[in-house]
Amino acid sequence: PTTLGAINEFVRLGEVTPENFVINTCDGSRRKIQEITPFFPNQIEEGDALVEQTPAATGMSIKFEERIRDLERSLGEERRALHEAEARYRELEQRYQELLAASPAQS
C-alpha cells in the first residue's frame, strides 16, 4: 500500500517510470502510473516528468537532527566501549591460556 504522493516521489526519483503499473488494492484494478496522474494533488505535467507545485520539503526539524546526533554519539561511545571490552577479554584469555600452559599437567 502507498499513496499518490509516494508514487509521484518514486517517479521523480526515477525508481519507477510512468510506464510502470500500480494495483489499486481496493478494487484490484491495474493501471499505468501515467493513467492515474490526473489524481495526483497539486501537480502539473511537464513532458514525461511530474512537477509538484507545492514547496519543497525543508528537511528534518532541528530537534530530530539533535536527537540523531545524540544517538550517533552514543552509538560511537558504545562501539568504543565494546572494542575496549573485546580487547580486554582477549588479553585476559591470553593470560589464562599462558597460566594453563605454565601449570604442571594434572593427571
Image: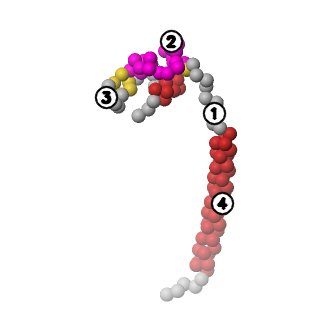
If you read the primary sequence from the N terminus, does the residue marked by circle 3 or circle 1 appear first? 3
Occupied quadrant, residue 2: top left
Residue 46 is marked as none
Residue 59 is marked as 1
What is the image's colouring?
Answer: secondary structure
- Label 2 sits on residue: 47
Mark 4 and mark 1 residues within 8 Å of each other at the beta carbon: no
The amino acid type found where label 3 is placed reads Gly
Q: Where is residue 32 in the image (x, y as percent from the top left)?
A: 38, 20
Does the segment drawn in magenta span residue 55?
Answer: no
Quadrant (top left, top right, bottom left, bottom right) of the N terminus: top left
For image coordinates 60% across by 70% down, the residue present is: 93
> Which segment is the magenta one?
32-51
The amino acid type found where label 1 is placed reads Gly
Query: Between tags 2 and 4, which lies in front?
Result: 2
Q: Position of residue 100 (x, y in %)?
A: 58, 78
- Label 4 sits on residue: 81
Instruction: Give the Cα distance between marks 2 and 4.
Output: 55 Å
The amino acid type found where label 2 is placed reads Gly
Of residues 97 and 60, the one drawn nearer to the viewer in this rendering: 60
Q: Can residue 55 be seen in this view?
A: yes
User: In the picture provided, is 74 more to the left or to the right than 11?
Assistant: right
Instruction: Give the Cα distance between marks 4 and 1.
Output: 33 Å
- Label 3 sits on residue: 28
Please tell me whether mark 3 sits on a helix, a strand or a loop: loop
Instruction: Give the Cα distance between marks 1 and 2.
Output: 28 Å
